[in-house]
Image (cartoon, rainbow, N blue to C red):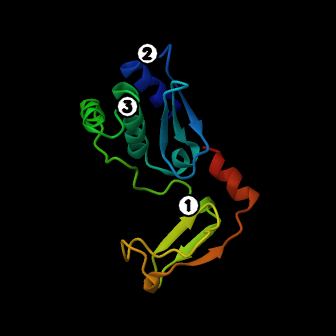
Amino acid sequence: MSTWGTALIALHLNPNEWSFGFDNAKKRAGLCNFANKRITVSRYLAATAEDDDIHQVLLHEVAHAMAGPKAGHGARWKSTATSIGYIGTRLYAGSIANDLAPWVGTCPAGHTHYRHRRPAQDMACGVCSRRFNPAHLLVWENRVITPEVRRSARSA
């Protein structure tokens, strides 16, 4: 994977300016850091996702670097992303590190939601209703994430 990131940077960007690495993100797949000129991918995603998904995340972030910091996910970014082979959507749809989230919420219909911080207020299931609806209130459970589980998730 590190080879893919470095190769895409060499192909589309200046490798003397841009670099690739892994980060510890649990809620996002990748990042294009314009200040450091560095593209990173979550090590947790790299440990669990399919190769094609990771490749798409890399293309997504390289497209950000190519389009520039003001492009966001607008037309310029989309055009650039498409031109280099990106076929995904604006956001990564898969889970990043749900196995490391200590808070697990379940709605009455059985949908599961994960949080890395304790929810500070009542939350309702976003799958069941786009607006807060007490009928879809999430019930939160705190689960223990052992050091062994954390280490295995980081060993990507």
Determine crowd level at label 3: few under 14, some 14-19, many 20+ residues with C-alpha closer than 10 A. Answer: few
Tag of residue 70: 3
Q: Gap between marks 1 and 3, in whole Å?
A: 31 Å
Residue occupied by mark 1:
98
Q: What residue do we see at 50% from left, 35% from top?
A: 1
- Residue type at mark 3: give it: Lys
**Distance from label 2 to label 1 (Cα)?**
35 Å
Mark 2, secondary structure of its residue = loop
Upstream in sequence: badge 2 or badge 1: 2
Q: Position of residue 126 (x, y in %)?
A: 41, 71
Mark 3 residue element: loop
Q: Quadrant of residue 67?
A: top left
From the viewer's perspective, is the residue at label 3 or at label 2 nearer?
3
Residue 152 coordinates in the image, percent (x, y): 67, 52
Give the residue number, with chain letter if any, for mark 2.
14
Work out whether residue 98 or residue 77 is closer to the camera in this orientation and state it: 77
Mark in front: 1 vs 3 = 3
* Identity, as a three-letter code, of the amino acid under mark 1: Asn
What amino acid is at disc 2?
Asn
141, 118: nearer the viewer? 118
Against 145, residue 92 (above or below) is above
User: Residue placed at 24% from the left, 33% from the top?
Assistant: 79
The vertical placement of 94 against 36, above or below, is below
Q: Are marks 2 and 1 in contact (CB under 8 Å)?
A: no
Where is the C terminus found, in terms of image quarters? top right
Q: Residue at x 36, y 21 (%)?
A: 12
